[in-house]
Each structure stands twice: as structure tokens, then as C-alpha cells.
Image (cartoon, coloured by chain):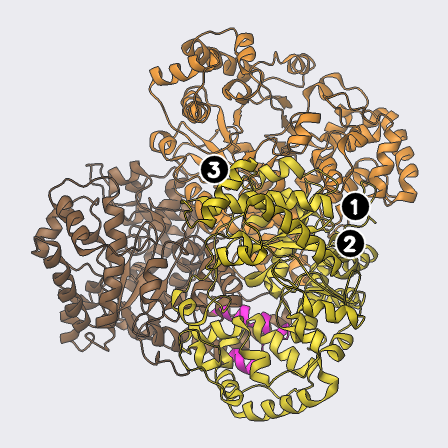
Chain colours: A brown, B yellow, C orange
């Protein structure tokens, strides 16, 4: 990356941004939420070819190409319906290079260029006529032990990385990491408890998963989930994560929750059951948080598998989700009524709907002790999205009700650049406050270090939230 | 404040902003809507200690501290439930100072620093280790007669200040002000008619308040409110104010409105009655405006007392309200169908939902003679909120369908800085138009003076709106 | 226009913007959607007086004046109710000039000043005291054959201009244009198929229009519309246009659609029928697009004739429409399920609700091959609206899922300035990317030429969308 990348062009603001960035640049990375496969670090095997590293698993990349008529199977995305997928990495890579102009102005371009240049030292610009040269250079690096996952982890200066697992996971990879001195409570690689696949009645295979959980009644189910959380905590987890369609939260009487569960298990759910059960379980998990200390993360608002053709051919999580309008103020009220001012509870709220930032989320975070604001997420995790987030929420929530940057990525090699982008954008935002005489430089410098490192560490670990001062 | 505070950093834009600001800086303040207690000016007693002046009554301040685990009773906020509240001003002040970093980047910080420095001449930066020095310096000033309310009012260069009262108010303070030559029609301190507490069925004590109004039927109620408006007008009122949950307006047949009223009085309201009656009364008050000339202000969209724990302990108006999505185009249609093009009617629309600015509010104000746009309000009354307002509404509404800045504050000492912020932000916005060759400098200079002074004076007094040119 | 108009003030950014703009400035104008009366070009008669050219037909202008109490009939807008309308052009022009300050900061001001100066060479600033001089100068120009429509068309460097017609139109003007070598497929002036007036049951006169179509059953109706599309294609049409209240799309069984149609024809529609039929026909027209190749444009979200007083006196399309919140993700799903990945289908989505850009529209365009994003429209077609559009959509949709600028205007003389504004704003946006080291200058230069010329040509003509690379 150019040393001034993403800093505002105005020379005074840029100079201040540079100065502020120096205070954050080299701080260790805290990655409290993401989707890296822990086996990558547990096994520490070389990464596969460049296409399988950078194109195939990245739905940001494959969906953009799909939007211009290049179907995912031509990019190597595995199919469920028998459509043959491209297997030659070089062919896939050439398709990317020939269509690289489609990514102009997008975060994918910026991330990928940084991965090539800063992680792999490949600075040749990607174009149709350089595709092979770049591919070959990357292949060479990937054979070098210095580019294995654990070596990169050290080079990336990651202090802690949280992966995300289902309650059904046996956490094998985390056990191996712990055995190697890399995992467990306080370790470098920890897990996160994500129970959606055993909560959502209407996801295919729910009943089978409940069977795998080994429970038959609602009470057993709740007890089992409570026990799984303890196991996750033993594997280092400090938070749970919940990816619901809406932010609805509503505690049901136990009998009613049990009835919904039973109907679902019998395959006899009625319309609205899934939504009510999900809303109920959100409160139930919040109550567990009060007991076991896991910080709750809520990621609402994605309409999953919107693109049916894509879903039919390639399954979940391949770029077919679309955001939708999301309401928080009424939806979360039952949860906040019960636990919003409880010092034992903490919830980090995310959104795909930017309109909620000034209107709902910043006022909620600036009013309830339990509420923190998560970083801009998914479609919003971009230089301009990060800037708009600060512009939108700082008035009502300040900086200290936000929770620091979260990369939320599966793309291990893109972790450093994602954090670097957030630090640069915060430097630019704070530089504007400084040059507009709204914040002294020394306080801005302290703030950027807090945003980059101290805040996420504090928020996701529930230290110091004791009613005294927070610093 | 630094002389360039809030001006864009780019030197040419900043130079133009400085030049434009000179045209607005010293114009008298018009404060057509706010919540200053008129007794402060009627009695002209010294302000209490710094904590009671700056912390205790300011829900922007106490909610931010509460959001980080410092409960309001530790900040001296009176409780209803017997929880002992901190009474020592210095202790409260030290808590503020020790947590001052929480306010970085917020308008509260900017306002407070200006109050300390520009109103009280205390320029020591607020920190844990300066808390006592700042407190002592403020105490000293507060004993000086030059810092009594009326002296400050003159120093602040306020031309007119509107307070806000319930129809149940006997307007004693305003009578004293009038007797002293400070109040009455055209006076320096005037009132505003705010009938919410006798309109909202579901607010506790509604029936008792109706009894205090001395009415027993819907017709008596309407007649009484009409009469109270005349009394308010005699105390200087030029506008009414309505703080509804939504912007719904719908005229009911008299019989139906009367039936709702009767049911409520008997404690037999049905679901939806309160909402329908509120929507009906908005039209009814609009009709009264046509007769008596009060400008109607509508402030919709706050979910009141969202934070139940706070409400239970401390009551209303202590920081527990949260904005919510607000629709205007369909909600207001019945009112605009009846009165939107009536030259005798004027309504100023406010919002807590910024998304309505370009989509609904600017097009309404740029289309209906009766509609003006109120300044960014509450959570949006911030440097960036004010800037986004101009960027959002000017395209469709221009400058002359906006109503000028409204401070809407209880914090008397913060009035000058709030208006100054608005003038600075308008200077920055207009400077951009000038430097982008979209508006000549001389017209920008005329515009900023109109926004700062002439427009609010004209809009809230219903002069000149006669179908001829407006200047 | 000043040579730097609309470019960001910061000198480095401005220098890059200037450089980029040079790559777009002189490219021919592609106007794939608008509302110019084709008779203007078919007849090539001199324009009427300045008021009838610039004030009377422009609802942006008349609504702003109306919002400040100058009723449209005083501005020459014809009435339906017998109210006499001003007929003297000079009187109307003087009213505009005396109130010109109302347009400060609006796009109408910018467009009008460019029309006066750049099209007609009249550079006297418009003010009350210059009204007559400007009027006289314009009148003189209008008599000059060099200012006739076809001469201006050539001077404007328009390559293709699409007008918009009802299926009921006999396309006489287009026939004359074709006879003169100006029209027909691939010609300079083409038509667009806009069937709203035969789809919307609840528009007055629907049944009469169906009679004029010469059909009596739903099947005849669909066949007739299919045939009319062929006639439109023969007159050059490359797209259809649909201006619905919502984005709802839902295919009904033929029997059900036929039943709705029959009820409407009998005047026996039930509540919801119109909405369901409109949603159904959107899918039906999309299916026709697959067969005949017309690109579908969807313009949803305007509440038509919101201002009833205006509608009663002056009818449709005189400034009484207001935007409203618009949802796309769920509304369009049935259509996208059926055709969203079909390479034979293409839909260009517009909005009046900016909140949909990041949240819904950019993700849809960045995910579905069939979806492109239309330019900011109507209330959003402004310098700041165009800038916010790029800032909002580029992250998820890039540049190549957008469809280029669309002027959508009736005001023929304002076409060049509208396109020029878009090119300048894109230059400023791209210059920011360049100076923030997010895009190299050479790629930015290629991009601006694509946005200005190559993309709209490609998108509205369905060339090259074959699953291969798009460049």
C-alpha cells in the first residue's frame, strides 16, 4: 500500500492523519470475530494455488464476476448439482485478471492488491497480460515455508484470532492448537459460539442436527447448549454470535418455547414459529451470557440465499445473500428491558442497514450500559463505509461505545490489510476533528490506539466494565 | 472556540467560510423553540453550583456516562424510587472530569468547552487532575452578578427566546417577565403552546390533567384548548409544538373524536385509541392555527422512555428516549390535503430520522407552501448532522424553505455556542458552494445572514408569507 | 460554466479531476431515457418564448415557486378548472427573476444558468433588475435558426436520444423523424415503451384506454402489448420503462390475472387488485423482454399527485409527486427468482430512496447478472446526489454494474448541462480515488470514458452481455 493510501488529500489533514496512524500502525491485531477455518492454523499446511487461495472461497470476488455473467462454476466454486466446476487454478486466475477492471473502486481490489504486494511481495499490476506472471510468482511464494499459515500469523502481528463454530463442532482443530501452545483460554486462536444452525427451524437438516446434539426436549436442548458454551469457553471463547434475519428478541414462557420446539421436531411448525423461537432464544442466550460471561454479538438483517439459482447450484455462503431494512429500537426492547442495564451483560450490535447508525444504534449504545456498536460489517466493511460509520455514530455514542474493528473474514491473508484500512480511516476521521479544532492532537493519538487495540480487547473480554471509569 | 473551529480544513474553502461567517457571527440570536425554564429569567437568581448547572440536568451528559456504567444517581439525577442521589456538586464534577474522554468527538464536549471558556472564561482543559481547579473557577464566576441569567441573556445577544409550556401552565414566570418589560407579545421571552400532556391518553395522569383543565366533554376540551392558545398568544407565543410518536394526522368526525375522549376519561380506551386521537388532534390544532396564527411545529419519532430501568428510577426526560423510523409522506397527507396550500397555515417539520430529509421532507417543503423544514433536532443537532442536513435538503427545498436554527435546549448557557455551531457549519457548506463555483460570494453572504437571523424571524412569526416574493 | 465548476476545491484533487474530465468532456451524449417531446425534433420549429421554454413546463421550477406561495397559474401553468393562467411570457419571467434567490444551491439554478450562458450565450446574471434584458436577449436568440431544435441537437453532440411513449401512441413524430433520416432503429431519436397508463387500473380513464387499445380480454391485452412492443422496436426502441408505486413483482396464474383484468374492465375492482395486477404485469413485461430484447427500466417509489390541490387544478406531472420509502429485496424476489440470472434479461433499477443504494440496490446489482443500477433520478439527479450515489454503490457494485447517466428530462435545452454535471461529479469522485491511492490515473481515465459513453451505450443496447468479459 502507498504510505498515504486512504488518507484525505488535503495536505494538513493528511499530515495529521499520518501522525495519528503512526500511533496505531504497529499495534498487534485483535481479531475478535471472523470465519477463518481453524484447521488452517492447526495443520499449518501450505496454502493451495493462488486461485484456491484468493478467488474460489471469496464470495466478494465470485459474486462480482457472476454479476457480469461469469458463473461461479467457471471460477472453481464447487457445485451441488453436478455442474462441473473449473479445476485449473491458472484458468480461474486468468478469468479474474481479464476482468480485474470490474473491481475498480471496490474493497476487494484494495484487499487483493495488498495481499499480493504486502503479504506475498508480488507488485506486478494484475492485468490480462500479466496474469501468468503474477500466478507464477504467487505459486513460488506459496511453496516457501515463510508463507505457511503460522509463519504468516506471526508476521501479521496477530495477538488473538477468534474463529466461529457451531455447537455441533467437536473443536478438534482448537484442541490441536491448544496442544501446540496456540489455543485455549487466553490463547492466540480461540473459538466463538455460533448456535444459528441449531436454532433456525427452517434451515434444512435442523432436526438431524438436534439429534446430533443428543437432545429430545426443549429443556434438554437448553441445558445442552449451556454445556456446549462451557466447552467453548474452555476452548478460549469469549463471545457468542447470532446471525438472525431480524433483531427481534422476545422471551416466551418456557412452556410456549417448548411447544414451538416440539412442533418443529415433529415437522409440524406453524407459520411464525421459527421467527418466534429465534427471538426467544436470543433472550435465552443473553441470559446464559449473564451467567457465563460470553459477550453476545448480533448480526441481523441478511436475507440469506436470495439468489435461488446460485443457492440451488452451489449452496449456502457463496454470495447469494442480500441486506434488508433492519429495525432495532422496538425489536430489541424486550431484551434491553430485561438486561440492558445489567452490568453482567454485554451485547455488540452490527448492521447491514446504515440508516440505523444515527437513528437507532448510536442512541442505543450511547444510552444502555450493555450495548456496544460493532464495526461496519460485510457490505459496509469498506473505506467509505468505515468513514461513514464514524461520522454517523460518534455524535451520540462517542468512540468508547464502539467495539473496535472486526475483520469477519474467511480470507486469512487479508486480515492485516483489513485492519490497516480501518486504522487508516480512523486516522483520517480523527485528523479531520483535529484540523477542525474539535479534538486536540494528543487526545486523538490516544483515541486511535484505543480504537485499534485497547477497546476491542476490553469489549470482547468483559474486563473493567464495573461501573467505575473505563480507562 | 478557535476562530476556525468547524471550518473545512482546505485553505481556500476555509478562507471563504471565514469571510461568510463574518456576515452571521454578530447577528442577534433568534431562539424560536427550546426548553429553558422561564423561571430562570423571571427570578434572575444566580445559577447553582457547576454540577447542577452543567451535569445534572443535561441528559446528553448523564446518558453518555450511564452508557459506560455510571448510573445517573451517582451524577445527582433525582430519583423517584428512593435511591439516594449524589448531592455533592464537586463529587459529581470529578466523575465528569475523570470520564471526559468519553465525550471526545461529541457535541456535548464542544458545547461544554465553549460554555466553560466563552461564557465563564475558564480555559483550563478539563481532566481528572484539573477537575477541582475548573470547579472552583466556575464557582467564583457564578457568584458574580455579571453571570446572572438576565446579564448573560444580554451578553448572549438574544433577541427573543421562546420557552415551552403545557396548556396547564399558569404562565406565572412569563407574567413576571412581562411586568419587568421582558415578556409578552413581541417581548424578549415568550412561550410556546405544547399540549402533548393533555392529548396523550396513555401518559400517566392524563385524566387528572383533564380534570385540572376543568373540562368534561370533548367539545369543552377543544374550546378550552382554543382559549388557552389565546392566553398563550397574549403571553407572546407565536407557535405551538407537538411531540408525537409518529407524524400521523387524520381528522375524525366530531362524534368519533368525542367517543375516543369519553372512553379515555372513563379509563376504557381500546387499543389504537390513543394513536387515533393524537392524529386527530394534530389536524384539530392545525385548524386552530389557521384561525389564531400560531405556527405549528411537529417533532415526531421519539420512542419515549425506551430505557425502562431509567424511567422507573428517574422518570421522564432523563435520557431514556430513542429515535425510530418515521414516515411523513402518507402520514401527513390528510393534513396537507386540507391545509397544505392554505396561505393561513404554516407547519415546521422536524425529524430524528435523517433518511427522511432527501426522500420526504425536502420534497414536501419544496412543494407545499405551508411546509418548512425545522433544523436538525436532538441527536442530529451536531456539526456533522447540521452539515448533512444542508447537503440533503438544499437540492429540493433550497435554503428558503428551511426555518433557521433552533437550539431546542434546556441548557441556557449553551445557547450561544449552539447557534454559533450552526452558523459555522452553514458558512462551511456555503463556502463549498462558492469554491465549487455553484454560488457567487455575495449571494452566499446574503444567504448566511438570512439563515442565521432573517429566516427564523420570518418563519416563526408568519409575516410576509402573502404569496408575493418572500424577500 | 466555470471550467472548474463542481470539482472539489482541494488543489491536487481538482487537478486530477480536471485531467479526468478531459477524457469525458467531448464524448457524444447518449440519452437512453427521457421525456423530450419528439414533436420538437420532428417539427423543428423555433422554441416559444423564454418563459414557455424554461419556466412553464419545468415542474422543478414551478414547484419551488409554489412552495413559497406563488401559485402555478401565475407562472402560466395551464389549469383544468377554469382558473385563468398567466399568458404573458415576460410577466412570468419577471416573477422567476424576482424570486431567483429561492433557487440558490439547487440544481435548477445550475441547469438554468448553463442553459442561458452555454446554450444561448446570455451571461447577464438573472435578477429582478435584469429580467427584461435577459428575456429580450433570449427572445432574439430564439428567432435565430441556429437555435432551432435540430441545430441544437447537432451542437449538443447527442448521438442518440430516447423519448418515452404510451403503447397508445401512434408514433407519428418518430415516423417523420425516420423519414427525415433522424429516427428508426439505430437512429438519432428513438422511442421507449412505457405502458403504465394501460396497466394502472386506478388511473382515471383506464377502461377507455383499453378500448382504444382495441382489446376486450386479458389474453388479447397481452397479445396487443406484445405487438405494440414490436412496433416500438421498429421505431428504434431498445427499452421499456415502468413507473410503479412500489417495486412489487409477482407472477399470477393467467386465470387470476385475467380475473383482475375483467373486474377492472367492469369497474368492479376490489382493494389490492391494482397493486397485484401491476406486480403481475411487471413480470409479464420482463418475460416479453426475454423474447424481444427490450431492456426493462423500473422507476418505483413516487407517490403521484400527493398535492391534491395542485392535481385538482393542474392535473398530472406538474410537481405534485413526492418520493416514499421503497423496498426492493423482497419486492423483486419473484422476478429475480425467475429471470435474475437469465442472460437474455436485463433490468435497470432506479430509486427515489437513497437508503436503498448501499443496503439493497448495490448488492443486487453486484450479485445478479440481469441487474444494473440506473443513475440517480429526479429529486436525486443533482451534483451532491450523483456524488453520494458513487460513494454508496461502488463498494458493492463497482462501476460496471451501473448504467451511466440518464437525464430523464423534458427540458431539451438542459440535456448538455445535465450530462456535463454527471461527468464533472464522476471526475471529482474518481479524482478522490486517485489522490487517495486507490486507483491509478490511467484506469480512472478509462473508467470515466466508460461511464460517460461506453457503458450506457452497452447497457441499453444489450450488446456483449454474453457471459464473456464485458470489455
- Of badges 1 and 3, the one in the foreground is 1
User: Considering the numbered disc 3 on the image, is that residue within a helix, a strand or a loop?
Assistant: strand
**Residue pointed to by mark 2:** B458
Circle 1 marks a residue in which chain?
A: B
Give the alpha-carbon distance from disc 1 to disc 3, as whole Å: 45 Å
Q: Is the stretch drawn in magenta largely helix, strand or loop? A: helix
**Residue pointed to by mark 3:** C372
Q: Residue at x 67, y 34 (%)?
A: C319
Residue A83: x and y, percent? 22, 36
Residue A436 lies in magenta, yes or no? yes
From this view, report whether residue C408 is shown above or below residue A290. Answer: above
User: Considering the numbered disc 1 on the image, is that residue within a helix, a strand or a loop?
Assistant: loop
Q: Nearer the viewer, residue B182 or A123?
A: B182
| The quadrant where residue C60 appears | top right
* Image quarter hosting the N terminus of chain B: bottom right
Q: Residue at x 61, y 34 (%)?
A: C306
Residue C330: x and y, percent? 38, 38
Q: Nearer the viewer, residue C227 or C84?
A: C84
**Residue pointed to by mark 1:** B465
From this view, report whether residue C379 is shown above or below residue B231. Answer: above
Give the alpha-carbon distance from disc 2 to disc 3, as whole Å: 46 Å
Residue B53: x and y, percent? 60, 80
Determine contact: label 2, label 3, CB under 8 Å: no
Circle 2 marks a residue in which chain?
A: B
Q: Residue at x 60, y 42 (%)?
A: B283
Amino acid at each position: 500500500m502507498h504510505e498515504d493510501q486512504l488518507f484525505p488529500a488535503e495536505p494538513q489533514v493528511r499530515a495529521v492523519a499520518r501522525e495519528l496512524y503512526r500511533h496505531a500502525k504497529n499495534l498487534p491485531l485483535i481479531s475478535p470475530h471472523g470465519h477463518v477455518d481453524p484447521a488452517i492454523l492447526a495443520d499449518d499446511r501450505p496454502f493451495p494455488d493462488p486461485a484456491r487461495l484468493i478467488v474460489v472461497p471469496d464470495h466478494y470476488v465470485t459474486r462480482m464476476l457472476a454479476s457480469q455473467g461469469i458463473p461461479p462454476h467457471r471460477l472453481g466454486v464447487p457445485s451441488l448439482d453436478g455442474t462441473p466446476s473449473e479445476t485449473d487454478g491458472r484458468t480461474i486466475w486468468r478469468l479474474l485478471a481479464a476482468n480485474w477492471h470490474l473491481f475498480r473502486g471496490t474493497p476487494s481490489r484494495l484487499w487483493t492488491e495488498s495481499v499480493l504486494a504486502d503479504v506475498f511481495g508480488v507488485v506486478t499490476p494484475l492485468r490480462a497480460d500479466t496474469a501468468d506472471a503474477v500466478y507464477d510468482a504467487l505459486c513460488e511464494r506459496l511453496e516457501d515455508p515463510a508463507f505457511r499459515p503460522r509463519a504468516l500469523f506471526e508476521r501479521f502481528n496477530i495477538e488473538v484470532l477468534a474463529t466461529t463454530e457451531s455447537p455441533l463442532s467437536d473443536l478438534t482443530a482448537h484442541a490441536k492448537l491448544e496442544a501446540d501452545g496456540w489455543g485455549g483460554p487466553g490463547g492466540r486462536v480461540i473459538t466463538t459460539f455460533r448456535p444459528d444452525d441449531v436454532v433456525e427451524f427452517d434451515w434444512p437438516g435442523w432436526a438431524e442436527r438436534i439429534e446430533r446434539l443428543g437432545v429430545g426436549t426443549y429443556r434438554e436442548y437448553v441445558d445442552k447448549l449451556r454445556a456446549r458454551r462451557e466447552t467453548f469457553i474452555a476452548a478460549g471463547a469469549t463471545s457468542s454470535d447470532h446471525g438472525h434475519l431480524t433483531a427481534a428478541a422476545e422471551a416466551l414462557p418456557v412452556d410456549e418455547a417448548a411447544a414451538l420446539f416440539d412442533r418443529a421436531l415433529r415437522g409440524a411448525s406453524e407459520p411464525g414459529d421459527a421467527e418466534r423461537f429465534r427471538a426467544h432464544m436470543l433472550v435465552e442466550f443473553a441470559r446464559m451470557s449473564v451467567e457465563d460471561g460470553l459477550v453476545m454479538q448480533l448480526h441481523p438483517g441478511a436475507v440469506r440465499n436470495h439468489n435461488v439459482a446460485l443457492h440451488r447450484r452451489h449452496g449456502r455462503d457463496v454470495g447469494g445473500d442480500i441486506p434488508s431494512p433492519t429495525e432495532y429500537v422496538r425489536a430489541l426492547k424486550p431484551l434491553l428491558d430485561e438486561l440492558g442495564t445489567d452490568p453482567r451483560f454485554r451485547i455488540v450490535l452490527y448492521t447491514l442497514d446504515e440508516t440505523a447508525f444515527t437513528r437507532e444504534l448510536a442512541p442505543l449504545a450511547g444510552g444502555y450500559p450493555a450495548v456496544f456498536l460493532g464495526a461496519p460489517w460485510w457490505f459496509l466493511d469498506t473505506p467509505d463505509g468505515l468513514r461513514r460509520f464514524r461520522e454517523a455514530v460518534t455524535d451520540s455514542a462517542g468512540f468508547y461505545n464502539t467495539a473496535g474493528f472486526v475483520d469477519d473474514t474467511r480470507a486469512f491473508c487479508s486480515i492485516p490489510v483489513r485492519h490497516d484500512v480501518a486504522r487508516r480511516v480512523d486516522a483520517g476521521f480523527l485528523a479531520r476533528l483535529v484540523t477542525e479544532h474539535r479534538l486536540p492532537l494528543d487526545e486523538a493519538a490516544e483515541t486511535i490506539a484505543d480504537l485499534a487495540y485497547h477497546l476491542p480487547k476490553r469489549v470482547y473480554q468483559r474486563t473493567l466494565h464495573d461501573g467505575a471509569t473505563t480507562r
